[in-house]
Amino acid sequence: MASNDSDTRPTPAAASAPPLIGVTSYLEQAQTGVWDVPASFLPQVYLDAVTDVGGVAIVLPPQPVTSDIARAIVSRLDGLILSGGADVDPARYRADPHERTGAPRTDRDAFEAALLDAAIEVQLPLLGICRGAQVINVELGGTLIQHLPDLVGDDRYQAGQGVFTEIDVEVDAGSRIGDLLGDDRSARAHLYHHQAIDVLADGLTATSRTADGIIESIEIDAMPFGVAVQWHPEENREDRRLFSGLVAAAARYRSEHAVAAPFPVPPPEPASKEQP
């Protein structure tokens, strides 16, 4: 614990530095040059979405983690993005896998769950994207629809072959996302999800739905900035409002939590050798 006020005031450099935004990633088999190896993978559009609005993107690959390790990671960040990707393991919401549910990525599920818990604990600004929204719902006690075509009758939410379905989504007035979007509460949503939120977890509020009732955005009630969307805002280079909101919240968080470093003590000078 700091012993006086001067120890806890943010330094000007710490308060004004660009916010560090951690972005979760995948582990995938990757080929480059002569190499064909497992590697951390994250589409560049996520990085651009952060850096375009003044943040610094820090890629976080899945790795073994404990609660203490997750806290240590989060303590070095000003904001966190849970990115899109593979299906959440149905075992995490006590369901049998659907035949169309992808093979579980238990390493990523465990890593992101631990980061989420640590982020909520310290109220770190948080943005979930697609899978990220589903992770938040599952880890807080909700469930997922494992294959949307069973419900809606077609592939309108995930056309396949990397083609995004574009629709206009309008979020609720008075929601945190609504405040971020400003006077125009609509967003051009790039959809690529064959799963969706089913039972909404306690402590979450749905802030937008499609015409057929599918939840497209949520917020964590107990967090100043804890929002998630089922669409892919990183794909829309013309609309960075969600990322601007995250980076602004992260800058405030950094200013409020930065602690002045102790005065550096120079190393002792080496002893000079006596001349003969």
Image: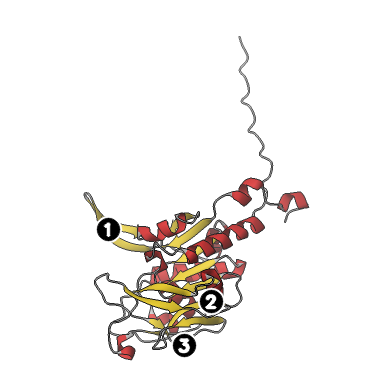
Graded by Cα atoms within 10 Å as few (under 14), some (14 to 19) or many (20 or more), the crowding at tag 3 reads few
Residue 272: mark in rendering: none
Residue where numbered disc 3 is placed:
199
In 3D space, how far apart are the residues under numbered discs 3 and 1 (Cα atoms)?
36 Å
Q: Answer yes or no: do the residues labelled 2 and 3 have beta carbons within 8 Å? A: no
Position of residue 260 measured from the top left corner of the image (x, y, whole percent): 68, 49
Residue farthest to the top, as pictured:
276
Residue where numbered disc 2 is placed:
219
Graded by Cα atoms within 10 Å as few (under 14), some (14 to 19) or many (20 or more), the crowding at tag 1 reads few
**Image check: 78 left or right of 162?**
right
Position of residue 59 measured from the top left corner of the image (x, y, whole percent): 43, 57
Q: Secondary structure at mark 3?
A: loop
Q: Secondary structure at mark 2?
A: strand
Position of residue 157 measured from the top left corner of the image (x, y, whole percent): 33, 80
Q: Is residue 140 visible?
A: yes
The quadrant of the image that shows the N terminus is bottom right
In 3D space, how far apart are the residues under numbered discs 2 and 3 (Cα atoms)?
14 Å
**Counting residues from the N terminus, which is met first, the one under dot 2 or under dot 3?**
3
As displayed, is residue 174 above or below residue 2? below
**Counting residues from the N terminus, which is met first, the one under dot 3 or under dot 1?**
1
**Counting residues from the N terminus, which is met first, the one under dot 1 or under dot 2?**
1
Q: Nearer the viewer, residue 53 or 8?
A: 53
Q: Residue at x 22, y 49 (%)?
A: 33
Residue 251 is drawn in which quadrant?
A: bottom right
Residue farthest to the right, as pictured:
4
The quadrant of the image that shows the C terminus is top right
Image depth: mark 1 or mark 2 in front: 2
Graded by Cα atoms within 10 Å as few (under 14), some (14 to 19) or many (20 or more), the crowding at tag 2 reads many
Q: Nearer the viewer, residue 127 or 92?
A: 127
**Image check: 1 left or right of 234?**
right
Residue where numbered disc 1 is placed:
30
